[in-house]
Amino acid sequence: MIAVRMLALAIGYLFGLFTTGYFYAKHVHVDIRSMGSGNIGTTNTFRTLGKKAGILVFLGDGFKGVFAVLLVGLLFRGYDIDIKILEAYAGLGAVLGHNFPVHLGFKGGKGIATTAGMMLAFCPLAVPICLVLFTLSIFVKRYVSVGSLLVCIGFFVQTVLFGQSGKLGAAAQALTEIYIVVGIVCVLGLIRHQSNIRRLLSGTENKVFVKEETK
């Protein structure tokens, strides 16, 4: 069944290649890679092209994670393998496609919106807590990067908790592999935020929603 796993991964990767930020920026005749941080994801799009663009990119990058998981779930249901394993591989593939898109020289985004989309389709029970963690980090600490890191950690921890409690919907013998695949997704998110972590530690990370002080 290795071939089926690789096929699920490949399907996810193809979805991930729809790099929404890059295509949106091209539509408005700019190259997002030459603007701001150069990242093709939601945060840089929001900062350089505005709120509307940021929302559209977030939705596009998120839903490709949703669609990858749902399509694989439909295509391979009934195979002699736990469908949650294949859904996890599809989500991983979507994140890999976003982070390392072949058409952009393997230089993509950080994969948080796509990870969130994967989570929504793969483990929806994990969404509320991750949403709270992300929202609090934005409105209390004003760091998008902190929220992104918390989403990665929260997704993995809750996958394990729901898996152990039987709420993930996977067979017991499939759990270890699922934890490994979801763990890779979340570690990728942490790795892609290395520069943000360094800036957080040095106190130079960019904040959001900071109002100018009145003189």
Image: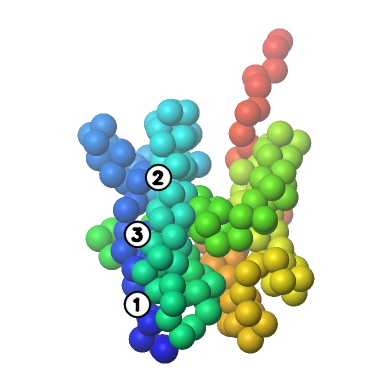
- At 67% from the left edge and 82% from the top edge, which residue is drawn? 172
What is the crowding at mark 3: few (fewer than 14 residues within 10 Å), some, or many (at least 20)? Answer: many
Of the residues shown, which amino acid type is indicated by label 2?
Gly
Mark 1 to mark 3 CA distance (whole Å): 13 Å
Mark 2 to mark 3 CA distance (whole Å): 10 Å
> Of the numbered discs in the image, which one, if any, rests on residue 191?
none
Disc number lying in front (2 or 1): 1
- At 36% from the left edge and 69% from the top edge, which residue is drawn? 75
Above/below status of 39 relative to 47: below
Indicate the position of residue 156 as horizontal and vertical percent values: 66, 66
Q: Specify which label sits upstream in the sequence, 2 or 1.
A: 1
Q: Specify which label sits upstream in the sequence, 1 or 3.
A: 1
Viewer-nearest residue: 103 or 135: 135
What is the crowding at mark 1: few (fewer than 14 residues within 10 Å), some, or many (at least 20)? Answer: some
- The residue that mark 3 highlights is 15
Is 109 positioned to the left or the right of 209 in the image? left
Indicate the position of residue 12 as horizontal and vertical percent values: 38, 66
Q: Is residue 182 visible?
A: yes
Viewer-nearest residue: 28 or 55: 55
Mark 2 to mark 1 CA distance (whole Å): 23 Å
Q: Residue placed farthest to the bottom in the image?
A: 1
- At 43% from the left edge and 81% from the top edge, which residue is drawn? 79
Of the residues shown, which amino acid type is indicated by label 1?
Leu
- The residue that mark 2 highlights is 60
- The residue that mark 1 highlights is 7
